Image (spheres, helix red, strand yellow):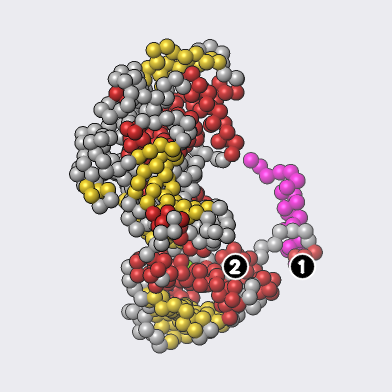
Amino acid sequence: MACSGSICSRGSAFIKKFSNDRPHYLSATINILPTSLANKIAAGEVVQRPESVVKELLENSIDAHARSIAVTIKDGGKTLIQIADDGLGMNEEDASLSFLRHATSKIASYDDLECIRTLGFRGEALASIAAVAQVELKTRRSDDDAGTLIRIADGVIQEQSKTGMSRGTTITVKNLFFNTPARRHFMKSNSTEFKHIYDAVQRIALSHPDIAIEFTSDGDAIANLPVGSMDDRIKNLFGERLFSTLIPIEERTELINVTGYIGKPNFARKSKAEQFIFLNGRFIISRSLNHAIYSGYEHLVEKGNFPFYVLSLELDPHKVDVNVHPSKMEVKFSDEQSIYRIVMAVVRRALGEQEVIPSVEFQQPGSSPAHRQTFGSFQHAEYPRFANFPPIAPSPFTNTPLDARPGGDAQPGRTTPFGLNQEPLFSTLDIPSGSIQYDGAPVALTMDRIIPGQNDTVAIWQLHNKYILTQIRTGLMIVDQHVAHERILYERAQSRFQNAVPSSQQLLFPHTMTLTPGDFALAKELIPDLELLGFQVKVFGKNTLVLEGVPPDVKAGSEATILQDIVDEFKNNQNRIVLDARDNLAKSFSCKAAIKAGDKLTELEMRSLIDQLFGTSMPYVCPHGRPVIVKVALSELDRRFMRT
Ligand code: ADP
Ligand code: MG
């Protein structure tokens, strides 16, 4: 299109102004900033405080394959930061190019940007640092006769010469922000800046235990970390004691590998400082992954407490974008949901394999509060396993005929109201037959379960039709029957979602129900997931549904109300917390289908409940975070009865 109109004529006026050599500030025009000023502006994003310098220089040393790095600072890094490495070094030409903006040896094309394997790639750290400090670079490659020395300040090279040195690179940064007073005043006290630098060194040290790191501040040796394994590095940084409270994680999947350690919940601290996620060797900040980890803990950690974790994720670099922010700490995953699910599941499983039962200490005379619950005792799993019995196939027309089984106290043919023994849970713990010990003695296994009268090892009682009491080696275990069943049904629901093999019992008399328009719309939306759970629901005209089948877990007699109950609970949950729709449905279903306080259980049902509870991945808390099990130690009873 031909160039006409006011824009072009204005443009020519601008050119005239410039060609008249008028000072820029007199004209309301666009200025092309001088490089030194542009670099200072750009530096603002890369170099926010001394810590950023340390982080960037350490990343460069790692990218240069250093085996050992020495970090020296003074005055919280304000007057001096020096990073010396034994990495590949640079030749003279590269050394002077390295201070130019967008000068990098790490990428050359857009394709490279799509697949970042190094910590750096933006080519702006050295340029930014040199724009706001006095910098000295000494570097030498192993093949070169001599090293190169460059002194640069305010972005301008002051001196370049040859120097004698061994292979590697030493960068010294003095008087940070000497030429940007606003930034200089923004720095905090030396001790605060030191703390930030310490954190940066710690992150690098944790992500690269294969590199020796020495850290000196104001002449004091702060850390001296030899090359070692991840275990050694954690012990060196946090001490043997903390290490002994960690649970190892290792999961390798096609999409991602997750390794590292997570802290046992009762050792959680009040601060988030000891939480580290590394992605392909880079420390990252990810709200979504933090959330995944917390969801894995699933209420085992009290609000305001933060568990320790160091998780290293390895992922094909094509599947992650690290070019989100100049600090390179934010990332975008192409398949965030799958990664979220894997991380959450890995954490949950690792915790589920530990014993995290709350134990109760009663009030000491004169003390408060009335009782205290702590998540304690990790020595060894200690719960009664009654039997390792095969699951019973659900009957198509009745709920579980548990009571009709030997030892049940009901008449043959009567159906039990509780679907307690329907199908294996997806993570049933594998116990070799005959290996079950209870109070040190092997427990007889039958094809079925321990039958009262035939096996006198473990007694079990129901208290007020609400709690199940049973003896364990260290005392008494109390289980809340409702939340225990909730946990079982919740995991069963999730496994049905995952495996998409619904199990359903057809109702002899389909149940027609009319809902409010809002509930009807919601229920209609939920139908595909409800079907996965085992509901058979059909839309039958305006605001009306017909329920033709229910999952076997639904209590006989509650078919008429269960769907409305689930919809109501789903809405309640929606108002309170943000949940994934399926998770919400699994929670709503398990809450509404579970046995209630007040439901009388047979002995067999109690044993079945306990067995299935310990087959779940997390028997100790219900999906809403309430404790399922409370232990009362024998020693506590002895104390109460003044036996000690
Ligand atoms: P980036 O790391 O994004 O490439 P930098 O400004 O941090 O950008 O560094 C520019 C270049 O200088 C790097 O690409 C690298 O080639 C070189 N370089 C920087 N530090 C070192 C070092 N410690 N050892 C060897 N080369 C280095
Ligand atoms: Mg860099």
- Residue 16, horizontal then vertical, whole percent: 75, 59
Which residue occupies the foreground of this view, 432 or 71?
Answer: 432
Q: Quadrant of the C terminus?
A: bottom left
- Is 11 contained in the magenta span? yes
Relative to 571, 425 lies left or right = left
Relative to 508, 624 lies left or right = right
Write the start and end of the magenta stretch as one range. Answer: 1-21
* For discs 1 and 2, the disc positioned in front in the rendered view: 2
Q: Which residue type does callout 1 highlight?
A: Pro
Q: Residue at x 60, y 23 (%)?
A: 518
Q: Which residue is label 1 attached to?
A: 23
Which secondary structure is most common in the magenta stretch? helix
Q: Residue at x 41, y 66 (%)?
A: 242
> Given the current orientation, which residue lies at the most extreme bottom position?
164
Q: Is residue 221 above or below residue 325?
A: below
Q: Residue at x 32, y 55 (%)?
A: 380
- Is 327 contained in the magenta span? no
Tell me the number on the disc at residue 48.
Answer: 2
Could you say whether the residue bearing mark 1 is in a helix, strand or loop?
A: loop
- Residue 328, horizontal then vertical, whole percent: 50, 59
